[in-house]
Image (tube, rainbow, N blue to C red):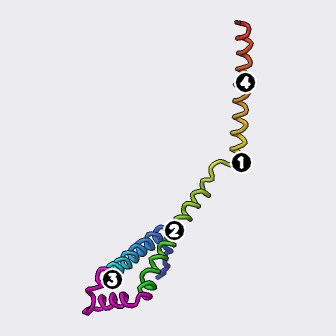
């Protein structure tokens, strides 16, 4: 039996990490909201989750390290990805190249010459009519 592991494609990995990031953000935000709304009522916790919430409420440095810092990291990482996507779109679609610019300038000069010749030809006709 030949067991060769297939390499997952890029779209599958992107989808997996996006779902993982969304789940992480939702969990962190849920924990922070529970900690905020149970601040005064959580004096005698009964289960492990509420004990953890009480720990976060009393030890604010751990709240910052475990909840706020990862959320800031997610925000900065998503900002980096946004700038990366915007910049890659500009690199892929560069707009007008130098050759296109020179061709456009030459075409504009040609059209200007034609218009000037038409005007010069029409002026002698107008002068002869007067």
Query: Residue 126 lies in magenta, yes or no?
Result: no
Of the numbered discs 2 and 1, the one sitting upstream in the chain is: 2
| Number of the label disc, if any, that sits on residue 79 | 2
The residue shown at (36%, 80%) is 32
At numbered mark 4, what does the secondary structure look like: helix, strand or loop? Answer: helix
Compared with 57, 9 (above or below) is: above
At numbered mark 3, what does the secondary structure look like: helix, strand or loop? Answer: helix
- Tell me the distance, in whole angstroms, between the alpha carbons under discs 4 and 2: 53 Å
Query: Residue 36 lies in magenta, yes or no?
Result: yes
Choose between 67 and 38: the one closer to the eye.
38
Quadrant for the C terminus, please.
top right
Between marks 2 and 3 in the image, the one whose residue lies nearer the viewer: 3
In the rendered image, residue 41, in percent from the top left (x then y), is placed at 25, 86
Q: Which span is picked out in magenta?
A: 35-62
Residue of label 3: 35
- Tell me the distance, in whole angstroms, between the alpha carbons under discs 4 and 1: 27 Å
At numbered mark 1, what does the secondary structure look like: helix, strand or loop? Answer: helix
Q: In the image, 42: left or right of 122? A: left
Choose between 14 and 68: the one closer to the eye.
68
Badge 4: residue crowd in 10 Å (few <14, some 14–19, many ≥20): few
Choose between 32 and 90: the one closer to the eye.
32
| Number of the label disc, if any, that sits on residue 98 | 1
Between marks 4 and 1 in the image, the one whose residue lies nearer the viewer: 4
Residue of label 4: 116
Badge 1: residue crowd in 10 Å (few <14, some 14–19, many ≥20): few
The residue shown at (49%, 78%) is 5
């Amino acid at each position: 039996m030949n067991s060769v592991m297939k390499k997952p494609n890029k779209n599958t990995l992107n989808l997996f990490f996006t779902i993982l990031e969304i789940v992480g953000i939702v969990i962190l935000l849920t924990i922070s909201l529970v900690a905020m709304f149970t601040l005064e009522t959580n004096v005698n916790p009964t289960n492990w989750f509420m004990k953890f919430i009480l720990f976060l409420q009393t030890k604010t440095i751990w709240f910052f390290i475990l909840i706020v810092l990862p959320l800031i990291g997610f925000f900065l990482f998503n900002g980096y990805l946004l700038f990366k996507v915007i910049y890659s779109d500009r690199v892929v679609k560069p707009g007008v190249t130098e050759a296109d610019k020179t061709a456009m300038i030459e075409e504009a000069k040609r059209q200007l010459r034609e218009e000037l010749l038409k005007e010069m030809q029409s002026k002698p006709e107008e002068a002869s009519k007067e």
